[in-house]
Amino acid sequence: MSELQNKTMQEKDLKKVSTHQKVGKILVKVLLYTFLMVMALIVIFPFYFMLISSVKTLPEYNRAVPTLWPEFIRLRNYVDAFNTGNLGQLFINTMIVGIVSTILSLVITVLSAFAFARLEFKGKNALFAALLGTMMIPGELFTITNYVTVTRFGWLESYTVLIVPFLVSVFYIYLLRQNFMQIPNELYLAAKVDGMSDIKYLWKVMIPLALPTLISITILKMMGAWNSYVWPRLVANEGEYQLITNGLRNAFTDAEGNTDIPVQMAAVAIVSAPLFLVFIFLRKYIMKGVSRSGIKG
Amino acid sequence: MVESKHKWKAWLYLAPAIILLIIFTVWPIINTVRMAFLEGYDSMDAAGGMQYSVSIENFTKVLQYKGFLTCLKNTMLLCVLTVPLSTILALLIAVCLNAIKPLQRLLQTIFFLPYVTNSIAIGMVFAAMFNMVMPTPNDPTSVGIINNVIEFFGGEPINWINAGSSYWANITVMVIYIVWNALPFKILVLLGGLQSINKQYYDAAKVDGTSRRRVFTRITVPLLSPMLTYVVITGFIGGFKEYSSIVGIFGEDMGPAGNSGSLNTMVGFIYEALQNSKVGRASAAALILFGIIFVVTMLNMYVSKKKTHY
Amino acid sequence: MKKSLLALFMAVILCLPLFVLAGCGSTTAVKDFAVPEEGFDTEKEVTITFYHTMGANLREVLDEYIVEFNKLYPNITVEHKQVGSYDDVRDQIKTEITVGNQPNIAYCYPDHVALYNLAKAVVPLDSLIASTAEVKRADGTTEVLGLTDEQKADFIKGYYDEGAQFGDGKMYSLPLSKSTEVLYYNKTFFEKNGLKVPTTWDEMEAVCKQIKEIDTDCVPLGYDSEANWFITMCEQYGSEYTSATGDHFLFNNQKNIDFVSRFRDWYQKGYVTTEELSGGYTSELFTMDASEKGNSYMCIGSSAGASYQKPTKDADGKYVFDVGITTIPQVDASNPKVISQGPSLCIFNKENSQEVMASWLFVEYLTTTPEFQADFSMKSGYVPVIKSAAEDPVYKSEFLELADGGDYIQALSVKVGLEQEAAYYTSPAFNGSSVARDQVGLLMQKCFTLRDGDVAAAIKKAFEDAIAECEYQAG
């Protein structure tokens, strides 16, 4: 409706504007596009640099005047990166941690959000406020004690230590609760009358209705596993449970011989690829989730 | 309500979350405060059975320590430089994006790309771009791509991040990287906000013949103020917790070779103290960081409340 | 909503200090280890863990001797693990001690022991060394749990005494193998250009100048460890570094400022670089092709790292140059001082005394078995710590005498290392000595890279900052 109005109004305006104004309008458009294009180039350049560097030979990379397109495409860098960085193992670790923690986290989040959205119990509001209160406290505060706690539990250097401490996210609970609240209570009451159990109702009605939010949560959680650095560095930095970011930072710095930047760039490209793929396919959900969360990782 | 006879059920559903929160969130908060007020609490001594008295010594030690003040300065500086810069840039880009039709989708996707990256990994790319290969000290023969660009325009190559590089060169690199990294989220939020502004405001302005600039400052920015507040607050909170972007560029030495720690931040300080088993000081620093974030957030909210138009 | 949140939040903050008083740990004093009456039980299964920094080739030697050890003590399972570098071992154990899951045995430096002892985590070895309890081995023989007089006498005295330098007269570690820093030089290049191998720092400066004239794009000298350089210079000049008693950190003095300023000039002139400043072990520069920019012709590094100093081979399978190894330059060549490095072994406290005794038996086995000591030395370039290994005829004829600058470069470095044993020094170990070590290394790097403005003042300030940093870290 308003768009139509807008259009007719614009047309009316157009008739009125003089050629002088028309030129001005085109100029503005040109400026707009130039600005956006320049910014887009700046934003995208590091990726381009990463990709071309990753297929260069070391001598070509080291040249005083760099080539903007590699003279010889050396895909072996990728093989080298995969082998020297032990990326295979790092990938598997990160996948395991990402998938398991996402699944468990979803279960916990759904159950809690359901309780807050649909069930009545004493102290519900106080509890919910207290939970939200913890969101204001920086996570760095937790690290110190959590480190001691997990060591006491004997969890160091294990998948458990990478998964369990971060299973509960108050933010996700909050997000999903808001979503659940929008589902009319009558549905729930009707289901109760039909003798449907809570779990069945959750599974059959609420989860399908809140699916977009759940997908957003899943993606954010996976991205978190992919990007986490500080905690894994503290609790699983040496051996077989190392995650991708930690391995990446160390793999190419302590190697004998020169730091082979092309190989390093190949490794970075390999590590970035999965996130990009996910992004391309699930752009909508990611952007939706992110704009509501304001948190990275 | 129907549920009242199944109270235990609610608690059952909440149990996993509550148990985990008690162990990994509530207890840490309590314990951090406890350790922060135990004089000189050190996890090694503590393991040896040392007793500590209650005092604020950890806070005074940390606050008087030059290294901490460096971290504080770096963190503040990065915040003050990057938050406004990235917000203004993001606002400009979002407004421009909102004003175009063709290519909007594509450009929007491109601007979002930095978000889906690993900050350590892309930090390494930035480091490579600013890198200056120096076979012999102080004798750059091959320079990184950024320096090539500078030389192309007739400038002198700058030692950005290598041994002997200046503090401001380092900060410049960090600011560029952090802004680059912070843009996508801000653009996304602001663009979302712009798209939800009712078109009628603009139409009215057009009828009145208001200039573009006036439209921007009198309509766009005020109507966008809740989103602006939001990105500024999250920007500051994120800025005070800056850490991994510096690791990405400089490695865990948190500074160029020969000057390690010169770019260390508050969070870096906390982790370092933790690694040196100075847990009492780490806790004190964490509480100080919390205090700062809290105050800054409150200030932001206060200011925005005065300025926000709904 | 926002207001109530804030109120809740403030309430939490105000309540928290109440908890402070609630939590106070209890003291558990760690006593000397008491060898139990019944001695070591050879029937009961026991597993011990061992952290070290051995690379793959050394782990092979270790595994071989664990098999031998198990022939004597089949009930002891030795699990060992390479934990990165020495600093990584220290950091890992440090965090593990705080929660009580430290390993049984670890590679250690005196600094590390001083640190672990804050938590009273290291077993004093005196009662074990002195123990005369008999242990039956699986091959039918018996040995005393402690060290016999012959075994004690077999240790090279200086190395053995390092284990008891912690001020309380107790013995906390046994030496495993030793190394020092040596000067590797490109013999072919030196001979071709008629250069004299430097024996003092003055000569070193002159040689660097000459080399720079021959090859302007090179960095003549690479020095791996900045910290070693600083500490060794203090030792050579007789200037103060640290003290185990009283004021710990004494390295801010004019003499030290002078040599740091001098070496900074060298760095600025492109005479020298270090591991941190060049971004990798300087052996990389040493073995680099001479036609590339930034290669070096001399390298000061660990005698145990000789295999990394081996040049590449050309198409005919010949080394592209010959390596010479000699003592590092001195202030006074007639009174040489070189650092004593290399791992010792310490044993950590455990509830189960059987574990402690099993650990001791393994440590004793590694340090007193001549075959292991000789093999380990041949594979690593470390110097053995017992005379019976160092003076073993086979070790001499099949290893030391083959010494050359190519295939047997390790033998050459061991030989040079053995020759200088009288010049080895150690620096004081105390709570904070590792901080001092880290700080002087960083101090060197920082001063070297200073460029603009009043450099002398900046160096002075860097020294003051380093002292302040030490005081803060150790206080």
Image (cartoon, coloured by chain):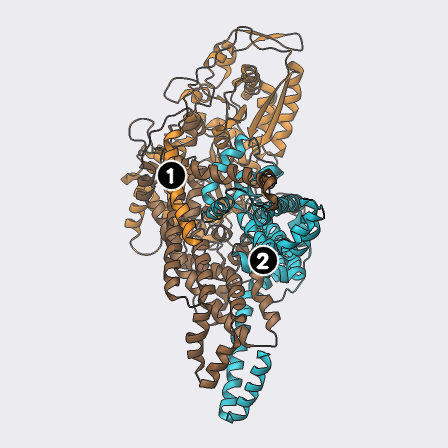
Q: Hue of chain A?
A: cyan
The residue depicted at 41 percent of the width and 46 percent of the height is C9
The residue depicted at 43 percent of the width and 65 percent of the height is B85
- Which chain corresponds to the colour orange? C
Label 2 crowd bin: few (<14), some (14–19), many (20+), radius 10 Å: many
Residue C379: image location, x then y, percent: 60, 30
- Marks 1 and 2 sit apart, C-alpha to C-alpha, by 35 Å
Vertical comparison of A19 with C116: above or below: below
The N terminus of chain A: image quadrant: bottom right
Residue B173: image location, x then y, percent: 45, 59
Marks 1/2 in contact by CB < 8 Å: the verdict is no
**Front disc: 1 or 2:** 1
The numbered disc on residue C15 is 1
Please tell me in which quadrant of the rendered image residue B67 appears.
top left
Vertical comparison of C258 with B124: above or below: above
Residue A234: image location, x then y, percent: 52, 40
Judged from the image, the secondary structure of the residue bearing numbered disc 2 is: helix
Vertical comparison of C39 with A272: above or below: above
Residue C446: image location, x then y, percent: 38, 47
**For mark 2, what is the residue?**
A289
Judged from the image, the secondary structure of the residue bearing numbered disc 1 is: helix
What chain is tagged by disc 2?
Answer: A
